[in-house]
Structure formats: C-alpha cells, structure tokens
Amino acid sequence: MRATTIHAPFDMRVADVPDPVVRNPGDAVVRVLRSCICGSDLWAYRGESARRAGQRIGHEFLGIVEETGAEVTGVGRGDLVVAPFMWSDGVCDYCREGLTTSCEHGGFWGSVGSDGGQGEAVRVPFADATLVALPAEAASDDRLLAALLTLSDVMGTGHHAALGAGARAGVTVAVVGDGAVGLCGVLAAKRLGADRIIALGRHEARTDIARRFGATDVVAERGDAAVDAVRELTRGQGAHAVVEAVGTEQSMRTAVSITRDGGAIGFVGVPHGSGTGLDLSVMFDRNIALRGGVAPVRTYIPELLPDVLDGTIDPSPVFDLTVGLEGVPDGYKAMDERTALKVMVAN
C-alpha cells in the first residue's frame, strides 16, 4: 500500500510499504478514508524532533474496518470508525481513570514499528478500546467527516485545554495560539459556557474562524503589547481561564501574564524551545494553577461525538486545504509556510 514516510528534514515521501495485517487477536485493520497533518507533525518535518529515515507519520484518521482479530467484538468489518491519536488497552489503571494517554500498553501512531495515519490503511492494536464507531451514513457526508476527524486530536485537545483552564459559565477565557488546536479551544470554551472569549492571533483568516467559533474579542498584538491589550479588555485583571496552544517559551510567558490572579492555564501546546516560560514565584504569588498535557482524547470522544453529530459544534472549518495521499508532501509545505491552517488528506 501507499503511505507517507519521513526521510530527513523537509523530505516527505509517499512510498510503498507493507500492507497492515492482524497480528494479535485484539487488532483491527482500518482502511483510511480521511487523515490530516497536525501542527506537531511540523516539528519532525523541520528536523526539530528526531525521526528515523523511512519512518511512518501521521496520528489522526478515520476509516472503515476491513478485518478484525478473533477477540474483537466492539467493531466489525464495514464499520466506520474514528481513532484517537494514541491507542490504549482500556483496562489498565490509567485507562480506567480516563488518562488513556498514559496507558501501560498504549502507543502513538507513527512511532517506530507502527503504522502512521497518513496512509491507505492502519493496523489498530486494542481495537475495542481504541476505536469509536460512527454512524455509517457519515461516510457520504464530506463536511461531517471533516468534523468527525477533528475528534481524533484537535477538538479533544482543545477541549482538554479548556477544561484544564476552568472554562465555564461566568468566566473570561483567553486563547493563546491561532492554530487548529487554539481554534478548537475557542469552540470548546464556548461549548462549556464561557461568557467572554479573547482570541490572540494576527492572521485574519484564522481570527475569522475564531469569531465564528465564539470568540468575542481578538487581540492581534504579541508579547507585552498583547498582555496590555488583554488586561485593557479585562479591567486590568486578566482572564480567569487561559488556553496555551503553542508550546513556546514566549507563548507560555504570555499565558502567565494574561491570567487573572486565582486563575488557571490549560496548556496543550507541545513544548519546544530552550525554556518553559514559567516563573514559579510569579505563579505562587498570584495563585495561578497550571493543568494540561497530552490530551486523553479517547476519553472525550463519547462526550463530544453527539454534539458533532447534531451540529451543536462544527469544528470542520479548521481544515482549509484538502489533498490526496500523493499530495501530502505539498500539504506539509503549505502548513510549514502558513499558507494552510490544517490540511486534510482524502483517500
């Protein structure tokens, strides 16, 4: 079959790789209908995260079950399913507590020795615990497929950040980062009832989506100027809840500076750079809480799925470019050059 492989910085190739097969009784093989490129994939693309030459890549996908192992009972051949960005066994202590990303037997698509989502098919370990069945009729609805695909990562990750920050009715939320995760953080905050949502971003196409998703204010400035702007909007106090969806030292410093005393930061931006941007003495003095990390999206899918299906939330606008599988290298280039927000791959 064909699948995306990474060979060196800026060297993405769609190559022939072995077809996935059922290896264990709990496995399933899923034929991929939709996958996508994540902002975190760009760190490998740029050479900032190490990869082996020829390693598979991609961790967001949905598709049709083609084959199952003897012990799989929850899904069957022909079912439309979505996969979270990590597989998990569903029975370990962490899974029972909802922290599926710390599963004792879990793993990440595209890790060495595993299939990546940006290909024609994927072997899914622990299929019953990992995959979530979707309505069959969704397979013929391109917009709905796009919205459902966000449940594999960005919508669940934005939700994780909003929860960590304490987004709820009666509070002001600020979102640092105008990528797909940050925009989904805006949508999640709106869904959780936030009264006011301040989106920090300077790209008009993205801030237009933020407003569509529920942002009441947009701050285009950066650094100290952004801090001043948010504080001017909040009577000098800052936001009760702040979503940090970038992962740089500067973005975290901004997040801390715009958080109201007694507030919280929900951080989901994959950390990269020379420092954390955290000053514990400042956070101590101002009673600022920090929660977040790798989002256990498998836990959130059952909660978010009904709202996607009935149209209460529609995250599909985060996809602004669609390519076929052979066009994935061009999709990486477009996202790296910021001419695309998030690229969907249609098989």
Image (cartoon, grey):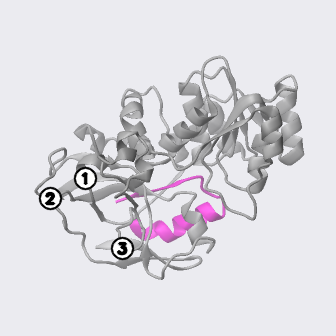
State whether residue 221 is above or below residue 333: above
**Which residue, as the protein is rendered here, is positioned at the far top?**
170
**Foreground: 253 or 139?**
253
Q: Position of residue 187 (x, y in %)?
A: 56, 33
Secondary structure at badge 2 equals loop
Q: Residue at x 54, y 45 (%)?
A: 318
**Residue type marked 3:** Gly
User: Number of callouts in the render?
Assistant: 3
Question: Mark 2 — residue?
Answer: 69
Alpha-carbon neighbours of circle 1 within 10 Å: few (<14), some, or many (≥20)?
Answer: many
- Point out the stretch of residues depicted in magenta: 325-347
Q: Residue at x 37, y 34 (%)?
A: 305
Is residue 154 in view from this perspective? yes
Picture coordinates of residue 302, whole percent (x, y): 36, 34
Q: Nearer the viewer, residue 61 or 346?
A: 61
- Cβ atoms under marks 2 and 1 closer than 8 Å: yes
| Three-letter residue code for mark 2 | Gly
Quadrant the C terminus occupies: bottom left
Whether residue 194 appears in magenta in the rendering, the answer is: no
Q: Report the residue at 58% width, 21% height from top.
A: 193
Mark 2 vs mark 3, CA separation in Å: 19 Å
Of 94 and 259, the residue lying toward us: 94
Which residue lies under the disc numbered 1? 127
Q: Which residue is mark 3?
A: 113
Helix, strand or loop at mark 1? helix
